[in-house]
Amino acid sequence: MKLLDIINSPSDLRKLPVEDLPKLAQEIRDFMIENVSRTGGHLAPSLGTVELTLALHYAFNTPQDQIVWDVGHQAYAHKIITGRRDKLPTLRQYGGLSGFPRRSESEYDPASVGHASTSISIALGMATARDLQREKYAVIAVIGDGSLSGGLAFEGLNNLGSASTPVTIILNDNEMSISRNVGALSRYLTRVITDKRYNKLKSEIWELLGNLSNVGRGIRNMVSSIDDSLKHFLLPGKLFEDMGIRYIGPIDGHNIAQLIEITRFTQSSTTPVMVHVLTKKGKGYSFAEDDATKYHGISRFSVSTGTVVKSPNAAPSYSEVFGHTIIELARQRPEIVAITAAMADGTRLTDFRREFPNRFFDVGIAEEHAVTFAAGLALKGLRPVVAIYSTFLQRAYDQIVHDVALDNLNVVFCIDRAGLVGDDGPTHHGMFDLSYLRTIPNVLVMAPSDESELRNMIYTAFQYTKGPVFIRYPRGCGPGAPANEPFREIPIGTPVVLKKGRECALVSVGNFLPTATEVCNRLESTGISTSLIDARFVKPLDNDFYRTLFEGHQFVVTLENNSLSGGFGSSVLELSSTLDLETLPRIIRFGLPDAFIMHGDIKTLIKELELDVESIHNRILSAIQSIMDKSFVRRR
């Protein structure tokens, strides 16, 4: 019988002898690899934290003690040993386990997470509440070295150091390389400073010196100065110590016994402690160890070969079209520079980095800085393109308003993963960007319906010199339009009329156009004369075009892959009320609801949200029939 079969909670884990935990760790890795190969997911990060997860649940009394994961994409082992093992086959599937910790899913998930750099601030808030309520439990924040580069993490550290309340920070470092000699010295110093007898002796002598005459205080100051100097040379954590956070490490993040010993020691601390843990991303699966970036977030794959199971769709993704287009333009225009926030691979800027290394900037997990950095480049005549996922761009809203839009700076924002993204769920759906961007003065907002249109929008953005431009496009592949034809500049604000009708107008923005096309065909087949429009622009809207549209149709239907609250449909409604028309058409809006949408494949979510062709067609028919019935009653 496998050890994993008897672990249904951390209390079961704590019944095992420490020497059995490495065997359990291997079983968890095998189980994880097998399941993620069928569902896809964040494999490499979770493989790297198996021993750390076991040590934390073994040393701390969870769920009373609270473990807050940063991002949470490394928490699959955590899910497996906290009663969710049997549900792992449903990982990231509709109605199944989330790929991230969720409060609604388990008492072992004290906070719902998904974005980087949040854990320290959350943990400090919990610890402060604990102190105010006079309760007794430990709070642990697990944060990666990448997330630590985010400004929010340092804001939390700064506050934590001054607050001086007990919080354990686990710095999960899977990138730093430390030589054998330095590592050995550090391990020796770690054993010394965690020895209870040493700490007791140090504390008593320190207090005694402080109570003595000026001579004693002089010795104390001298020792402190020497101690600080040595730590600056020998301990990589002196920065944290200077902030008021005790530093321990670095230690081997795959040595369970040592991890348990160190984390148990931190429980006696009355001040914040940081434990620096070295782990290997992808640990235990050779393909993931060799290419942690590829297996960071991966779709279904073959366990034996590591080969990804590819979709039959041969069309390039929108991200790939962006990547190729920006290189083509940069070859022609030396003022173009590219910026990303730790997403060079995801945004497909890796080829740009290879060809133009001096014009590429990865600023790390620091979206706010990325935007303001772009503002500085634009102020000096360069043309920066900022490539960020929609859900992460939310973090930089103030910088967009204050540092870019206020001065009409020529910065191009290419917003990837806009709209529903599927498996990663509510923290990653990019469903709010149209709503928050269109409230900002001086901005131009576009959304392509296919790959060719994306290409021409990027070209248009660099021809435009009146302020910031935002181009948002979805995750995955488009319908397969040509993406290698000569560039064409798009007239600003002008939609495209693909078909003219008299009764109903379908106005689609972005990747809802294929759906709108099918709905149009169905309406026509039922005898309803229907116009089909590719809006292209969310801001500005062409007043003359929409005036003619409103005057020429009884029904105007908007379709968007964005929240209905404040989105494209709302802008059309607002415009209709300002044009002083004698009669207004009935405006029907389709888009994402005013709710956080769970994870699942996009096709299933679209059906569940009634945004599929059948549902949209039926609702339009119902609305038309209702109006006709009311007109008949009035005539009688």
Image (spheres, grey):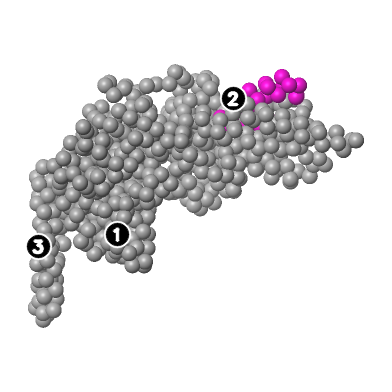
- Image quadrant where one finds the N terminus: top left
Mark 1 and mark 2: Cα distance apart in space: 54 Å
Given residues 37 and 338, the one toward you in this image is 37
Question: Of the residues tagged 3 and 2, which is closer to the observer?
Answer: 3
Task: In the rendered structure, find residue 207 and report the number of the disc placed on it.
Answer: none
Which is nearer the N-term, disc 1 or disc 3? 1
Q: Earlier in the sequence, mark 1 or mark 2?
A: 1
- What percent of the width, then of the height, locates residue 250? 18, 49
Number of labels in the image equals: 3
- For residue 398, side relative to residue 192 (left or right): right
Which element is circle 2 on? helix
Q: Nearer the viewer, mark 1 or mark 2?
A: 1
- Tell me the element at label 1: loop
Image point (52%, 20%), residue name: 480
- Give the residue type at disc 3: Tyr
Q: Which residue is mark 3?
A: 198
**Which residue bears the numbered disc 1?**
137
Query: Relative to residue 308, is residue 578 drawn left or right?
Result: right
Name the amino acid type tagged 1. Answer: Tyr
Observer-side mark, 1 or 3, equals: 1
Q: How far from the left and from the top, in percent, is residue 544?
A: 73, 37
Q: Which residues are magenta?
A: 506-529
Q: Judge whether residue 474 can be spotted in this image.
A: yes
| Residue 466 horizontal/vertical position (percent) | 57, 42
Q: Give the alpha-carbon distance from disc 3 to disc 2, as whole Å.
A: 70 Å
The image quarter containing residue 511 is: top right
Badge 2 density bin: few <14, some 14–19, many ≥20, Cα 10 Å: some
Check disc 2 and give the amino acid type.
Pro
Question: Looking at the picture, does residue 336 appear above or below residue 173?
Answer: above
Residue pictured at 26% horizontal, 35% vertical = 5
Estimate how packed mark 3 is, as few (under 14), some (14 to 19) or many (20 or more) residues with alpha carbons within 10 Å.
few
Tag of residue 514: 2
